[in-house]
Image: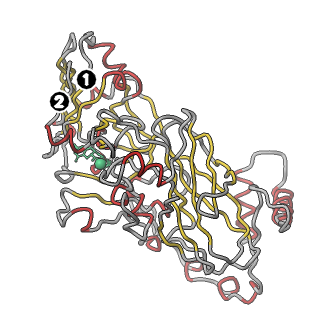
């Protein structure tokens, strides 16, 4: 073991420091990683507390995988996760699909996500007519309507435009939508997993339009998919000229079929349904195009006058604690032990500024720290080091963005919107964590 770590140190570190010195320094840091119960900082490092590790057969005995050769490099020409990760999968339920798996949703296990990137195999999949298998050589994108030079592009032609890579979440506006009247799922995956976040590569539509010449009268863009549902959606030209993209890359590889291979529309921060997959046509027009029932579907009704809030497309500032959660309860914690609370915050209207945590259902708040990359219209991870007290708590998170928005309470949200909607829920989410560490999905109305 020592020999192996020494070797890897020398290959990775090209300083004058010898590997011996490096190891000593690491051991020093490890030993220094103690905390005092009084001074709890977000930067506290946890040392393993397990006693009698020397009696553990897993450390004393040599394992079969340490004594025989492993698989050849030719085994998985496209790699797969360890078989031990077999439970980390997208999940479906009849409650969300009425039994039709071609007009359905498979939700992301956000409880298992690390950092802010969703691996492609776990990206949530919402489709209205199944996932088509499109031959990219036969796929075309037509751009027409109120442009000077309408065109039809092949995939090779699209990829000639200068490309950019951006990290953005996609969230279905119905994320959390089944829960307006109260908790429905004792599961974070089903309650909040209608979203994922990836690094997308593609071209800004404004760059293509520079070539085509957008006419002044053009106020709306219709996007249509090449799948059986077509998913025709219209969006305002202002947003198109701001940051909408046509993307073909997802986390360093081609889009997955489920995400719209070979190309999709990406409308950063706005409702996922606008991010038309298997994109085949863009038409610029004076007016939005949509079927009547779609208008009704994607607008929010206000409680008092029954009027629709039309053309409101951004996903509002939101957050959820991913650890603990119903799927990740606190286990074997001792009173006084430190435990990291983690979660995800996101806003379709800007960059996350901060996240507060409450242990009493929203009466008192403390500030969490943001960790890793903090990017516009992207998942942002937050963290708080908590001293476990072994008592019941109501654990909530409340995010703020740089556009000045803050998550409303469930009561504030119900007072303005009522409970009839299935869209745009961003009220503060609360978990009831029992003294034993079990986690239940609850809503706090005050
Ligand atoms: N062509 C097409 N595009 C589509 C859909 C569809 O059914 N067909 N579903 C939409 C909906 S409702 C959502 S929330 C997002 C989901 O994107 P994802 O499946 O990549 O997560 O795609 C949108 N784009
Ligand atoms: Mo959606």
In front: 262, or 441? 441
Q: Quadrant of the N terminus?
A: bottom right
Disc 1: which residue: 220
Instruction: Give the image's coloring scheme.
Output: secondary structure
Residue shown at the point (19%, 35%) measured from the top left: 224
Asked whether residue 262 is in view, the answer is no
Kind of element beneath mark 2 = loop
Q: Could you say where residue 254 lies in the image, as x and y percent from the top left?
A: 35, 43
Q: Are marks 1 and 2 in contact (CB under 8 Å)?
A: yes
Residue 196 shown left or right of residue 37 in the figure: left
Count every numbered label the image shows and give the total.
2
Identify the mark at residue 129; answer none if there is no mark: none
Q: Could you say where residue 244 lies in the image, as x and y percent from the top left?
A: 37, 29
Q: Nearer the N terminus, badge 1 or badge 2?
A: 1
Q: CA distance from mark 1 to mark 2?
A: 8 Å
Residue 235 shown left or right of residue 111 in the figure: left
Residue shown at the point (39%, 65%) measured from the top left: 89
Kind of element beneath mark 1 = strand
**Quarter where residue 156 is shown:** top left
Disc 2: which residue: 289
In front: 217, or 90? 217
**Quarter where residue 366 is shown:** bottom right
């Amino acid at each position: 073991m020592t020999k192996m770590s020494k070797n890897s140190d020398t290959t990775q570190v090209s300083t004058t420091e010898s590997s011996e010195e490096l190891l000593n320094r690491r051991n020093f840091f490890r030993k220094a990683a103690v905390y005092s119960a009084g001074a709890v900082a977000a930067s506290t490092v946890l040392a393993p507390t397990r006693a009698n590790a020397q009696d553990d057969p897993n450390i004393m005995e040599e394992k079969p995988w340490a004594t025989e050769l492993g698989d050849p490099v030719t085994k998985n020409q496209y790699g797969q996760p360890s078989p031990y990760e077999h439970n980390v999968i997208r999940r479906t339920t009849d409650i969300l699909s009425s039994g039709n798996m071609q007009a359905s949703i498979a939700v992301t296990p956000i409880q298992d996500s690390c950092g802010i990137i969703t691996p492609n195999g776990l990206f949530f999949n919402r489709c209205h007519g199944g996932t088509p298998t499109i031959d990219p050589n036969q796929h075309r994108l037509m751009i027409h309507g109120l442009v000077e030079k309408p065109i039809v592009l092949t995939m090779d032609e699209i990829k000639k435009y200068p490309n950019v890579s951006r990290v953005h979440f996609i969230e279905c506006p119905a994320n959390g939508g089944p829960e307006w009247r109260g908790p429905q799922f004792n599961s974070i995956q089903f309650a909040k997993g209608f979203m994922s976040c990836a690094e997308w590569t593609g071209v800004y539509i404004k760059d293509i339009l520079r070539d085509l010449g957008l006419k002044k009268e053009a106020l709306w863009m219709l996007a249509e998919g090449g799948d059986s549902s077509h998913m025709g959606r219209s969006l305002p030209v202002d947003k198109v000229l701001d940051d909408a993209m046509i993307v073909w890359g997802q986390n360093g590889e081609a889009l997955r079929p489920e995400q719209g291979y070979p190309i999709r529309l990406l409308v950063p921060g706005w409702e996922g349904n606008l991010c038309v997959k298997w994109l085949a046509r863009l038409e610029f027009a004076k007016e939005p195009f949509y079927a009547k029932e779609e208008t009704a579907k994607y607008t929010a009704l206000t409680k008092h006058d029954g009027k629709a809030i039309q053309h409101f497309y951004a996903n509002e500032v939101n957050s959820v604690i991913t650890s603990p959660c119903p799927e990740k309860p606190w286990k074997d914690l001792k009173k006084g032990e430190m435990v990291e609370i983690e979660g995800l915050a996101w806003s379709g209207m800007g960059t996350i500024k901060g996240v507060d945590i409450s242990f009493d259902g929203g009466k008192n708040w403390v500030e969490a720290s943001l960790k890793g990359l903090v990017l516009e219209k992207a998942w942002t991870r937050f963290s708080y080091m908590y001293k476990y007290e072994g008592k019941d708590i109501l654990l909530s998170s409340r995010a703020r963005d740089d556009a000045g928005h803050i998550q409303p309470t469930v009561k504030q949200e119900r007072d303005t919107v009522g409970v009839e909607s299935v869209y745009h829920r961003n009220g503060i989410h609360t978990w009831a964590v029992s003294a034993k560490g079990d986690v239940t999905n609850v809503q706090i109305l005050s």
